[in-house]
């Protein structure tokens, strides 16, 4: 018996296996494409049907509207009204405000933790910190939302004496908990992928660990950290359950961060189940879906591109 | 093998039977508890029938009825003109039954010194014309508004009857169910909310006056059934056409005195109260 025996039988199995995997890969791709096509298709009457445009045109969804003769024009989201009002600004503003709070809360914590874990922590410490923070990503968002609704809201109201129990601050902090692991993971990987040669060079020139981290590694990993922030932002924009439960859901246009707010995603979740098929309201909700899809798609694409460039830079494939 | 086949047939036949005896009831969140109790009691006496009850709001129930996704729709409001039109185009002939009466209570925190409100004040509060309790003789504190999501029949009813069709104040926080409204008001001294009368243990009801000179009436079964409580409404079951077979049996049972007893136990007021 020779140690190697060519078995032609296994060839067709490999062939089939390979094709099967390829089909799976394309199935996911096609599914995403079809989902987008479906969502966009349901939103098209806003552009094509004059009957829908009477209630909800791009103009009406974007600009201030005057609904009563002697009242100032305003942005208003009141879809179930004698005169339905479909301004998207209150929702868009709510989404962005919640995401900003989430970023302000999560980014410093996540980046700080990433620097510590990648640069200063002992090996044993890192093996505790890293999995525990990444475990946060496994908490279902409905649990985080529930926590914000019952515990965090009361805590914040007692500490800061807030007028509204459920508000953007509350929702933003809960959202922040959800995106800390995203920023942490990407930022930590970025810092770890800074080549050892760079560190060695800095050390050889007499830099202490602090100088190595902050003047060498951190600037080199900055694009990766930025990518982490962008990906986290994308998640914060699209996250639904937490804001639905914790933000109070009142569609207000205001600059305040302690008011209640209604986000794009929460609006779809709260209203799509009841809406009459084919009504203007239905089309508007799908339009919101399209906007949300494009928005998070672009944000995530930006994040991925930055990551890609970072990899190329450190692997020295391009200058 | 033959036995296996026979068993498969048996299972198939059984599942067919189960399917035939299944009645779905979907709609109003206000009526969910009532419908669940009705279904449970009915199924105790009719083992072959399975009744599935789900909420989601009157609008979702009506949409489901029109789309053929449910056999019975529970609703706390009548169909809108748009819904009647869509039902007609889909060939759905909506059959309407009143199963109970319900008062809409105004919830206040237990420590709120305000005792009663007029219908006018209520409208001004929810349309942002009155924003501070001191304007009603209370402490100098902002009024925090709680309401229902816009898929709720209560939302629509309150908007029509109390706000006269005007929009709710934008800062009114929409909540997903009556229980959430009760919970929110119970935890907010400055809060005000609205919902069914079957819910209160942790909050206080405001007495309602038709106008300044009228007497305040509290939401109670007696006051709703004699129509002295000003914010009351009918609760409906909608069907596609006249009920037949099992559905008819169930509906007849709901409207019988046994059904009415459950209506009372669920905190609503039966139609034939007097």
Image (cartoon, helix red, strand yellow):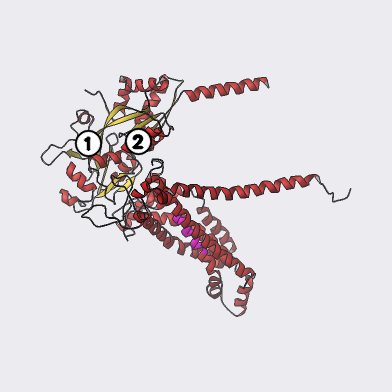
Can residue A240 be seen? Answer: no
Residue at label 2? B85
Farthest right residue in view: A1
The stretch in magenta equals: A227-242
- Up-down relation of residue A101 to residue A202 (above or below): above
Chain of the residue displaying label 2: B
Closer mark to the observer between disc 2 and disc 1? 2
| Residue A228 is inside the magenta segment | yes
Q: Tell me what residue is drawn at x 36 percent, y 38 percent.
A: B59
Residue B132 in the image: x percent, y percent? 20, 52
Q: Residues within 10 Å of mark 1 (few under 14, many from 20)?
A: many
Q: Secondary structure at mark 1?
A: loop
Q: Tell me what residue is drawn at x 42 percent, y 48 percent.
A: A45
Residue at label 1? B231
Residue B5 in the image: x percent, y percent? 64, 22
Farthest bottom residue in view: A205
Q: Quadrant of residue A193?
A: bottom right
């Amino acid at each position: 018996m020779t140690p190697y025996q060519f078995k032609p039988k296994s060839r067709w199995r490999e062939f089939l296996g390979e094709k099967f995997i390829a089909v799976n890969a394309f199935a996911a791709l096609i599914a995403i494409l079809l989902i987008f096509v479906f969502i966009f298709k349901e939103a098209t009457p806003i552009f094509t049907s004059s009957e829908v445009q009477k209630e909800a045109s791009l103009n009406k969804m974007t600009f201030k509207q005057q609904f009563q003769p002697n009242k100032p024009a305003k942005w208003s989201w009141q879809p179930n009204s004698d005169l339905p009002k479909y301004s998207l600004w209150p929702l868009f503003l709510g989404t962005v405000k919640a995401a900003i709070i989430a970023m302000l809360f999560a980014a410093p914590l996540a980046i700080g933790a990433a620097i510590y874990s990648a640069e200063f922590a002992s090996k044993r410490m890192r093996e505790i910190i890293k999995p525990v923070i990444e475990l946060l990503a496994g908490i279902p968002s409905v649990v985080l939302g529930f926590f914000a609704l019952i515990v965090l809201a009361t805590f914040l109201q007692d500490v800061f004496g807030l007028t509204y129990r459920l508000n953007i601050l509350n929702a933003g902090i809960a959202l922040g908990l959800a995106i800390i692991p995203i920023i942490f993971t990407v930022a930590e990987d970025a810092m770890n992928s800074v080549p050892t040669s760079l560190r060695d060079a800095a050390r050889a020139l007499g830099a202490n660990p602090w100088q190595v981290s902050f003047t060498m590694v951190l600037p080199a990993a900055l694009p990766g950290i930025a990518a982490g922030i962008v990906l986290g932002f994308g998640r914060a924009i699209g996250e639904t359950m937490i804001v639905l439960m914790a933000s109070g859901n009142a569609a207000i246009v205001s600059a305040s961060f302690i008011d209640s707010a209604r986000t794009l995603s929460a609006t779809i979740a709260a209203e799509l189940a009841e809406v009459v098929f084919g009504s203007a309201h239905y089309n508007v909700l799908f339009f919101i879906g399209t906007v949300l899809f494009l928005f998070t798609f672009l944000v995530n694409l930006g994040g991925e591109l930055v990551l890609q460039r970072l990899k190329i830079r450190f692997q020295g494939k391009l200058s | 093998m033959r036995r296996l086949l026979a068993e498969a047939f048996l299972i198939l036949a059984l599942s067919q039977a189960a399917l035939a005896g299944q009645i779905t009831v979907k709609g109003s969140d206000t009526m969910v508890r009532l419908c669940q109790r009705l279904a449970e009691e009915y199924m105790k006496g009719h083992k072959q029938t399975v009744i599935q009850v789900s909420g989601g709001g009157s609008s979702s129930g009506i949409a489901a009825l029109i789309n053929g996704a449910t056999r019975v729709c529970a609703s706390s409001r009548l169909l809108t003109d748009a819904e009647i039109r869509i039902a007609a185009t889909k060939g759905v002939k909506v059959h309407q039954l009143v199963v109970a009466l319900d008062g809409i209570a105004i919830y206040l925190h237990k420590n709120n010194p305000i005792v009663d409100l007029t219908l006018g004040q209520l409208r001004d509060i929810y349309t942002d014309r009155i924003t501070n309790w001191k304007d009603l003789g209370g402490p100098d504190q902002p009024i925090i508004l709680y309401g229902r999501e816009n898929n709720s029949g209560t939302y629509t009813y309150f908007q029509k009857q109390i706000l006269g069709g005007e929009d709710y104040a934008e800062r009114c926080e929409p909540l997903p169910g009556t229980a959430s409204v009760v919970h929110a008001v119970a935890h907010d001294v400055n809060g005000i909310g609205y919902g069914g009368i079957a819910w209160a243990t942790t909050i206080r009801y405001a007495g309602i006056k038709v106008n300044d000179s009228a007497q305040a009436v509290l939401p109670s079964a007696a006051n709703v059934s004699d129509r002295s409580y000003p914010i009351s409404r009918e609760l409906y079951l909608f069907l596609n056409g006249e009920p037949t077979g099992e559905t008819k049996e169930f509906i007849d049972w709901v409207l019988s005195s046994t059904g009415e007893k459950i209506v009372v136990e669920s905190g609503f007021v039966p139609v034939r109260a007097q």
